[in-house]
Image (cartoon, grey):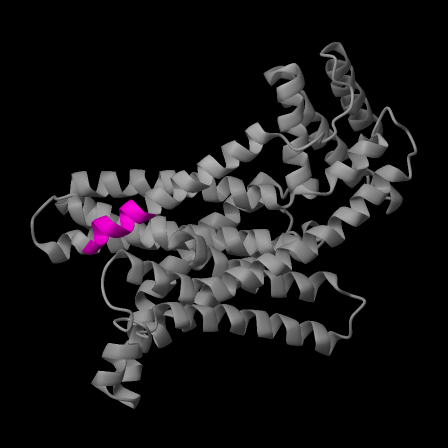
């Protein structure tokens, strides 16, 4: 990356964005130090599970940590700083070209998405320019787009939370921060900017990697994906259903579902399709080895599926304890890395890591044998795992309902 001019341009833009956001943050810190600290802490904690989930999407070929950090930083520093000024200017333009009433009702739905989605999409473009060889599938585009969106979401939510503190006029009070965290972070987080960024990123990933398609087809898909992200954002910000379902927690949840489910379902379908395509390719690299020391028939059936990988780890823990569960995860990670190195070796771009990662796989196999669990397979469904998943789901639903009820009573 250091030899790419685009990298240094990106770094300069990041520094400028960081300086702009430092000015904004400094104003809040000076007036509301405690509320600022609470807002940063809450939304930073919210970012962790999202980061881990997005990073895990591409288990078989995880993106380099440096590029993931750059994508997140672009969203949080560049896209946010551009949008703070750009959205306000475009909102004023809507009022002048249309009417103040139009701007009051639809300004946030027209101005915000237009500026923000362009700014976030440029972050994925920057990643492509500095590390084209790391974009090997549509799923890579999804990951980088989602991380740009996540960075934007976290920083924007902190700004909104502190804006709510200022609007409340009660001094350095954290109640508006908590309310913003519940509504914009906890309840809206899973299908807002992270999701919109993932959708646009999928289109750019398709444009870059599907060289087997005509250029017009690839450009058309990329444009449709970005427009889909913009349209989903417009729907999310729009005043539609603002007061059409009555009041209370159930009405608020219904609005969130009606506005958020369409893009969520679309991106889930895209991720599933891209993941299956990538899994077939990399698992095929391992199958060609025909070496049960590196991967068994049962493990070939497990490695390409996130749910089956999880089931295999659960089964190992149930049969042979926590060490076996950890060893299965390490074996799966080593097998995935070996598959990537095999594909690079086939393209004459490997750095000789095939032998090293083969040794790592064998080491983890020996660990599993010593624990009496030599094969990382899923086993039969366990009522304990089913009960645990059901309990986790019920707890999540209960927490969401409590949050909605608290907001409804606020």
Which quadrant of the structure image shows residue 129? Answer: bottom right
Q: Residue at x 57, y 43 (%)?
A: 55
Residue lying furthest left: 170
Residue 294 or residue 31, whichever sits in front: 294
Q: Residue at x 58, y 30 (%)?
A: 383
**Residue 45 on the magenta segment:** no
Going by the image, does 268 lie left or right of 399? right
Q: Residue at x 65, y 51 (%)?
A: 131
The image shows residue 239, relative to residue 3, as above or below, that is below
Q: What span is colored magenta in the figure? A: 401-408
Residue 178 or residue 163, whichever sits in front: 178
Residue 293 or residue 394, whichever sits in front: 394
The image shows residue 269, relative to residue 406, as above or below, that is below
Q: Is residue 161 visible?
A: yes
The image shows residue 405, relative to residue 340, as above or below, that is below
In the rendered picture of this protein, how many numbered marks are placed on residues? Answer: 0
Going by the image, does 367 lie left or right of 72? right
Residue 240, percent across and down?
Answer: 33, 75
Residue 203, percent across and down?
Answer: 62, 66
Residue 350 or residue 39, whichever sits in front: 39
Residue 92, percent across and down?
Answer: 26, 79
The image shows residue 92, relative to residue 393, as above or below, that is below
Q: Residue at x 50, y 68 (%)?
A: 229
Q: Is residue 24 visible?
A: no
Main SS, magenta residues: helix
Residue 260, percent across and down?
Answer: 43, 63
Which quadrant of the structure image shows residue 218? Answer: bottom right
């Amino acid at each position: 990356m250091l030899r790419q001019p685009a990298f240094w341009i990106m770094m300069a833009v990041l520094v400028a964005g960081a300086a702009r956001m430092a000015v904004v943050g400094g104003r809040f810190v000076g007036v509301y130090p405690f509320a600022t600290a609470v807002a940063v802490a809450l939304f930073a904690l919210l970012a962790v599970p999202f980061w881990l989930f997005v990073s895990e999407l591409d288990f078989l070929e995880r993106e380099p940590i440096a590029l993931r950090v750059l994508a997140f930083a672009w969203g949080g520093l560049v896209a946010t700083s551009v949008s703070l000024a750009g959205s306000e200017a475009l909102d004023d333009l809507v009022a002048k070209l249309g009417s103040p009433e139009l701007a009051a009702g639809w300004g946030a739905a027209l101005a915000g998405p237009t500026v923000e989605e362009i700014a976030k999409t440029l972050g994925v473009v920057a990643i492509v320019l500095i590390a084209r060889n790391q974009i090997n599938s549509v799923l890579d585009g999804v990951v980088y787009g989602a991380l740009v969106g996540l960075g934007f979401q976290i920083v924007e939510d902190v700004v909104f939370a502190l804006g709510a503190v200022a609007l409340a006029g009660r001094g350095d009070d954290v109640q508006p921060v908590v309310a913003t965290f519940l509504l914009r972070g906890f309840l809206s987080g899973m299908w807002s900017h992270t999701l919109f960024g993932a959708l646009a990123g999928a289109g750019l990933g398709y444009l870059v990697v599907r060289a087997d398609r005509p250029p017009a087809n690839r450009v058309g898909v990329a444009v449709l994906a970005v427009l889909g992200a913009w349209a989903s954002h417009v729907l999310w910000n729009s005043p539609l259903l603002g007061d059409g379902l009555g009041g209370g927690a159930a009405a608020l949840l219904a609005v969130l579902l009606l506005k958020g489910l369409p893009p969520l379902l679309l991106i889930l379908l895209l991720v599933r399709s891209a993941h299956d395509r990538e899994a077939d390719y990399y698992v095929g690299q391992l199958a060609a080895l025909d070496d049960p020391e590196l991967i068994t028939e049962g493990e070939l059936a497990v490695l390409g599926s996130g749910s089956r990988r999880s089931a295999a780890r659960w089964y190992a823990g149930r049969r042979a304890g926590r060490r076996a569960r950890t060893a299965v995860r390490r074996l799966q990670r080593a097998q995935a890395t070996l598959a990537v190195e095999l594909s690079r070796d086939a393209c004459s771009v490997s750095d000789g890591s095939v032998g090293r990662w083969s040794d790592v796989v064998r080491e983890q196999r020996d660990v599993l044998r010593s624990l009496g669990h030599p094969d990382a397979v899923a086993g039969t469904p366990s009522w304990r795992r089913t009960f645990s998943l059901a309990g986790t789901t019920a707890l999540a639903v209960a927490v969401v309902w409590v949050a909605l009820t608290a907001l409804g009573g606020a």
